[in-house]
Image (tube, helix red, strand yellow):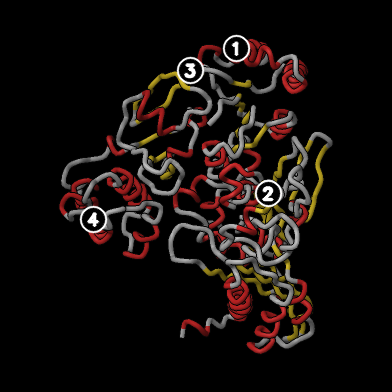
Amino acid sequence: MRKHDPKNGEEPGGASRRDFLRGSGLAAASAVLTGAATTALDEARAADDGPKVLSGEVEITLKVNGEDRKTTVEPRSTLLDTLRNRLDVTGPKRVCDRASCGACTAIVDGDPVYSCTTLAVTCQGKTIETVESFDVGEQGVPHAFHQNDGLMCGYCTPGFVTACKALLDKNPNPTLDEVRRGLDGNICRCGTYIGVLQAALDAAKAMKGA
Amino acid sequence: MNAFDFAAPTTVEDAVKLLGVPDAEALSGGTDLLGRLKDYASSPKRVVYLKDVKALAGISGDATDGLTIGAGTRLADVLADKAVKESYPALWQATLEVGTPQIRNMATVGGNLLQRPRCWYYRAGNGLLAVKDGKSLVREGDNRYHAIFETDGDALFVNPSSLAVPLIALGAKAVVAGPRGERTIAVEDLYQIPKSGKDSELTLAPGEVVTKLVLPPAKGLNASYEARQKQAHDWPIVLASVNLNLDDHKVASSRIVVYGVAPIPWRSKAAEEALAGKLLNPESAAAAAAASIAAAKPLSMNAYKVGLTQTVVKRALMVAMGNRYWEG
């Protein structure tokens, strides 16, 4: 069973019922009288080794840029809001908040994903990389963006740089078409795509020289 | 988004138990559910995360014996699968353009099949049928992306799954785990046209989870073709998948399924009948495409989809023949 609440370690069963009742507070306490919550409770009793139902505030640990970061979130907190508002990791940007624009892109277990549409509680035990951890030297992706004027207002840039890094990690020698497809999940409102695409190709070359 | 309780089971049995209460929703890639939560189109009391159920992910089998795709398999992993790419191009092609690289790294096959409609009236909180004071917001409003078939009733949204269409064309079955055990149904039986605002467009009962998709051996020709408003991350406007079994160059049997035109993945029996027994060539493809739109009844703003459907069905058949004449 995955550990979602470090306070309770791997202790199964019993802890889940206590958490369920303690964490859900007044709202759930009154809801216990209704059918739904009663069923849930009966179920928790029946399956002593069943998974925990988390509610209210949950303590989690996220591995962000190589560091274990402990924080408290609600199950509904997105990875993006947790990074920005709880952990002060502000590289990923909140723009559309609907998995459309790419400004919130983070690399989770090696894959670029939209952190605005990922729940923080689902990211425990995973490796989370953001633009803060990238090489800013001449072999790095950020330098290539700088050299190619790959930004105008700059708000989409961390997302683009992150998507670009994730692409090059998997495909160190992409064609222009592969770069286009790889960066397809990010939007630049200013329209500086020419610079972005060239930056990706240049970064691929620079990384090989490293 | 409203608060909810959260559980992350690691077995299908636990997932079924946890989902078997009222107001519970399954979460996988989250690309549909998170948007609905944020827009208050859905406000479940409990969210059950399925990606820790490792048994749900992965692809096994081959084109000779049939392929089994776990419902929790990410779209990126479907695209990376050699058997899908080589033997089930209808599925591969339809998956290729779903969303973006980030979406395909998150989204799963089961989630794609069971995502809720993208009708903007539904997403804005007007209910699935978007009927207000006895009037259809869709029929009287902006319906440019809505249905052109089965439009006599109130369900005017289109089914949003790009993967349902090739899977139905390929004759895939869905294995469903539930409180009363496991059942296997045709993928098309996951969907229904809701008759009233109380009905869902999905047929799954509370607590039921799609665990895997079983594709029969790839014997005939299969292909997909889609048309988009522009080459960007959006849904296709119309997508057609075809699967043809030939006998001496004649079409012995076929399945022709269209996305974006009806509240369910639209199987065009009329097109299939037009093609039955015919030699497979551009003329018979054109005749089948013409038959596919005979029953269309477009709304006030989407008559363009009728012509588009005809073209997309024809081109899907031509792709199956290996003839992309429009590319010159």
Q: Residue at x 43, y 49 (%)?
A: A100
| Callout 4: chain | A
Percent coordinates x, y for residue B124 in the rendering: 56, 44
Q: Of the residues shown, which amino acid type is indicated by label 4?
A: Ala
- A78 horizontally vs A200: left or right: right
B258 or B241, which lies in front?
B258
Return the mark for residue B131: 2
Instruction: Specify whether disc 2 shares its chain with disc 1.
Output: no
Mark 4 / mark 1, whichever is N-terminal: 1
Residue B323 seen in render: yes
* Residue at screen point 18% across, 47% down: A143
* Residue A59: mark: 3
Rounded to the nearest angstrom, the CA distance separating label 2 from label 3 is 43 Å
Tell me the subunit letter for badge 3.
Answer: A
Tell me, yes or no, whether dots 3 and 4 are on the same chain. yes
Find residue B138 and report its image quarter.
bottom right
Q: Secondary structure at mark 3?
A: strand
Using the rendered image, report if marks 2 and 3 lie on a common chain: no
The residue indicated by pointer 4 is A199
The residue type indicated by label 2 comes to Val
Q: Nearer the viewer, mark 3 or mark 1?
A: 1
The amino acid at mark 1 is Gly
Q: Amino acid at mark 3?
A: Glu
Residue that mark 1 sits on? A25
Discs 2/4, front? 2
Q: Mark 3 or 1 closer to N-term? A: 1
Residue B245 vs residue A66: left or right?
Answer: right
Q: Residues within 10 Å of mark 1 (few under 14, many from 20)?
A: few
Under tag 4, what secondary structure?
Answer: helix
The percent position of residue B173, horizontal first and vertical second, equals 75, 55
